[in-house]
Every structure is written in C-alpha cells, then in structure tokens.
Image: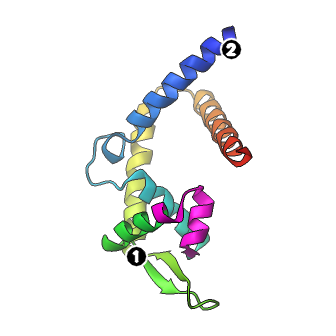
Amino acid sequence: MMKLKSIEQIEHEVTVLMRRADYKRTLDGSKNGIERSAYLLLKQLCANGPLSIGSIAELFGLDISTISRQVAAMENKGLIARLPDEKDSRISLVQTTEEGKAALQRAKEQRMEAYTEVLEDWTEEDTEHLAVLLARLNRAIEERKKAR
C-alpha cells in the first residue's frame, strides 16, 4: 500500500516536472530556445555524426513520419542539412549545420544556467542523488518500451 502511494506521487511529480522543465523552451521562459525534440535531435547528431532518418527514428523509438516532419522543420530553420549517403544513393543523411551547433550550445547554456539557479540551495549529494535516480527512471522507462 505504501509503495502505491509513492508511485502515485511519482506519477504526479513527473507529469508536473515535464510541464515545468520545458517552460517556454527553458526553465526561465526564454522564447529564443529550441524545442525539446529539436534539442535532443541536435545533441544526437552532434554526438553521433550524420544519421539517416530511419536510424534517428530507431534511436528515438518514433515513426519515420514523425522524424521526417521534425527534420523538415529543423531543415527549414537552418539547424540541420541533408547530404547523400555515399553507400546508398537512395538514402539521405542528416547532419547538424554550424547554425544548429550554435543553437544547441546556446540552448544548453540556458538550460544549465536555469538548472544551476533552481538547484543552487541543494547540496552536492542531493543533486548527485537526483541525477542517479532520474537516469535510473529513464533507463527503466526505456526498457519497458523495448519489452512491449
């Protein structure tokens, strides 16, 4: 019974967190930030180099049509560019542009600044504990998705 009460509170707090954590793109209400989906996609492209739309869809566990729409919107904003795959001319790869890298850097700095401010009165132990638990929660959610 106690665990059910905690799970109910976790469900509520995560829902509230998702709404508040991306408050108008960052925690400070900045309208100049980039959308969460674009932020995550830019981070992946910067970390893993050019990727096909199919690879991106698989990586995020989303439909190709969803990723195609996101890529088109980001391409229109100059954040990413397509280039031909040298191994298969039917496939185009998506890579981050210099403008996309700069936008990602600005967004990360804004987010880091906001979280630093929000957590400034937390102890280092508390922030480390939160980081570990959030990572554990994300891994458990991802594993549940894969199992279905």
What range of the chain is rendered magenta?
51-66
Q: Which numbered disc, 1 or 2, marks the residue closer to the eye?
A: 2
Q: Position of residue 111 (x, y in %)?
A: 41, 47
Instruction: Give the position of the C terminus as an image quadrant.
Output: top right
Q: Position of residue 120 (x, y in %)?
A: 45, 31
Q: Is residue 125 magenta?
A: no
Give the residue number, with chain letter if any, for mark 2: 3
At 65% across and 40% down in the image, what residue appears?
141
Q: Position of residue 85 (x, y in %)?
A: 57, 87
Q: Which numbered circle lies on residue 70? A: none
Category of crowding for the residue at label 1, using alpha-carbon neighbours closer than 10 angstroms: few (below 14), some (14–19), many (at least 20): few
Observer-nearest of 9 and 118: 9
At 68% across and 14% down in the image, what residue appears?
3
Hey, which residue is sitting farthest left in the picture?
A: 31
Amino acid carrying label 2: it is Lys
Q: Is residue 52 magenta?
A: yes
The reply to whether residue 100 is in sight is: yes
Amino acid carrying label 1: it is Glu
At 65% across and 14% down in the image, what residue appears?
4
Q: Position of residue 104 (x, y in %)?
A: 42, 61
The mark total stands at: 2
Q: Which numbered circle lies on residue 98? A: 1
Whichever of labels 1 and 2 marks the residue nearer the N terminus, that label is: 2
Q: Is residue 26 above or below residue 133?
A: below
